[in-house]
Amino acid sequence: MESMESLNITYSFGFDGQETKSFHLLIDPTTMFIVEKNKLTPPDWAELKSFKCPNCPLDVKRHKYCPLAKHLSFIIDFFQAFPSYHEAIVTVETDERTSFKETTVQLGVGSLMGIIMSCSGCPVIGKLSSLARFHLPFASIEETEYRVLAIYIVAQYVKMKQGEKPDWQLKNLKHLYEEIQIVNKNIVEKLSDVEMNDTSRNAVVTLSNFAEYIIWNIEDKKFNHIENIVSSFKSI
């Protein structure tokens, strides 16, 4: 398989009687960071000294902007004019396929924000960037959980093969999502000060609900639904 120069993902939002708005993401397949093509200046509120999360390890002396806020700022700015319940036709183009969905702006923005946050360079949420390689637009909470668990278990197998200690009990995954919840809470609080409408805030709340669902299932070991899904592979 030939190595890819970049991962291309384009989200296009179509509104009745208005021109379609598109957001194109270019992602480095090695680092899984967003490639910045246009060096636009982010707003002041995206500065790390203003947006920094309680668990952020970045030094404000070395980083002027919060990487997550910097990449989200232009999305948030555009959707200021739209309430979360506003309807749109959202089309997502990747290198492999095109998907579309008639949905609310909130759900479309949430799907877009999810991949931007994980590939922004945020040292916390960035640990989910591997999921972006096989991005699934508009993923349900069950689909998200399954994808996270699947890639995490594969990662533990790779660690074991390399002589490292695997985390089969998912303790580190639970801890990661607890850290992500701290970030999500901070984002919602900060956006309350800068966002006119509630679209982006509600989108993050939805992502936060997904994270809480995964934490809850790991804590209570409630994976009966997952066991049913993988039942055919258990007989191999």
Image (cartoon, rainbow, N blue to C red):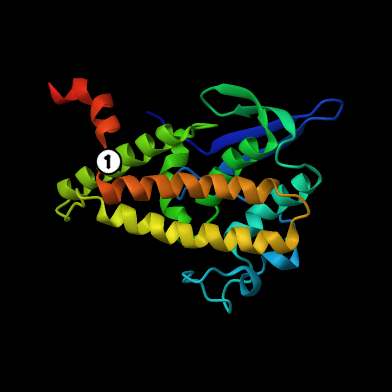
Would residue 19 be found to the left or right of residue 3 on screen? Answer: right
Q: Quadrant of the C terminus?
A: top left
Q: Is residue 114 above or below residue 65?
A: above
Q: Quadrant of the N terminus?
A: top left
To which quarter of the image does residue 9 belong? top right
Q: Is residue 55 above or below residue 218?
A: below
To which quarter of the image does residue 25 belong? top right
Secondary element at image label 1: loop
Choose between 208 and 54: the one closer to the eye: 208
Residue 174 % position (x, y) = 32, 54
The amino acid on which the numbered mark 1 sits, given as a three-letter code, is Lys
Would residue 158 be found to the left or right of residue 64 on screen? Answer: left
The residue carrying mark 1 is 222
Choose between 192 and 117: the one closer to the eye: 192
Residue 133 % position (x, y) = 45, 37
Hey, which residue is sitting farthest bottom in the picture?
61
Residue 214 % position (x, y) = 37, 46
Q: How many marks?
A: 1
Choose between 89 and 131: the one closer to the eye: 89
**Residue appearing at x 79%, y 29% in the figure:** 15
